[in-house]
Image: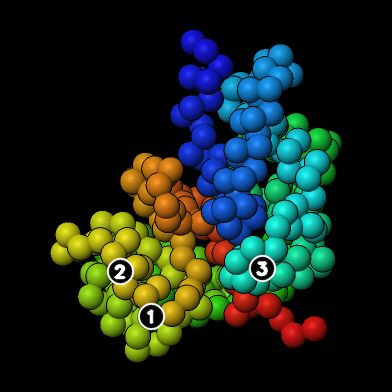
Amino acid sequence: MSLGQQLAPHLPFLRRYGRALTGSQTQGDRYVRATLEAIVAAPDEFPREVDPRLGLYRMFQAIWNSTNYDETPENAGASADDDQESIARARLARMTPLSRQALLLTAMEGFTPEDTAYLIDVDVAEVDSLIAEALAEIEKQTRARVLIIEDEPIIAMDIETIVRDLGHDVTGVAVTRDEAVALAMEDRPGLVLADIQLADDSSGIDAVKDILAEFNVPVIFITAFPERLLTGERPEPTFLITKPFQRSTVKAAISQALFFDSATVPEL
């Protein structure tokens, strides 16, 4: 099997990580594209002594660390992108980048502390402290009102518990597209957590589209069918959690989504 064939199944999830790390599909995909270009240009430099997925993320980390893109945006294009980048830079100035990477690699991407230490080039003993640092810093910065779109009662209650334990408020729990839109219009949320398949065979994706047509709000999709959203077509969600999920995964995604949201930037 060629290297490309070995890496192909992991690319959608690398794109997920890139988007979560940068807060932008465009920026995240730029890093993934640069990673693939580096592998094609110098295939002998790809780390063959580890699992292909681990090697792929290692190459991505090398690109991330070499560009300093967070500090120096590549171009001053669309104003919306500029706003997002300004928000990101303001927050990154108050937070160690390695801590965010450690949190996302373990909680969202499922790497072990040993693998994470290899990916970000630190001692294993340092990974836990980096994660704790990330959680402590993010939790100080972010509080929001959250709309949950989920038709399975047990899962909805589990998500609601996680959200409240993080210190956020829940504006409501919707089980259909129409109910989700109505709740969002009645009490505007600062974050939406959405499943794809809803109770009346309506779509959480359509519900989110309807909501975003009215106002901007960060969205996290929580689904057993990630392949429906990781298609390589635009637009894709910046934050995506796969069911069954761990509490730490939801916590990391919520924190990171709010990390890049302008409504949660504290006054300086």
Helix, strand or loop for disc 2? helix
Pick whichever of labels 1 and 2 is earlier in the sequence.
2
The residue type indicated by label 2 comes to Ala
The residue under the point 28% across, 82% down is 182
Pick whichever of labels 3 and 2 is earlier in the sequence.
3
> Badge 1: few (under 14), some or many (20 or more) residues near its Cα, within 10 Å?
few
Q: Give the labeled residue for mark 3.
A: 82
* Front residue of 132 and 122: 122
* Front residue of 232 and 147: 232
Helix, strand or loop for disc 1? helix
The residue type indicated by label 3 comes to Asp
> Badge 3: few (under 14), some or many (20 or more) residues near its Cα, within 10 Å?
some
Position of residue 266 measured from the top left corner of the image (x, y, whole percent): 71, 81
The residue under the point 23% across, 75% down is 178
Helix, strand or loop for disc 3? helix
Q: In the image, which is nearer the foreground, mark 1 or mark 2?
A: 1
Q: Residue 214 carries which label?
A: 1
Task: Calculate the distance from the C-alpha at mark 3 to the C-alpha at mark 1.
Answer: 22 Å
Image-quadrant location for residue 66: top right
Note whether 95 is above or below 179 in the view shown: above
Query: Which quadrant does the C terminus fall into?
Result: bottom right
- In this figure, what is the number of numbered marks? 3
Question: Would you say residue 84 is visible in this rendering?
Answer: no
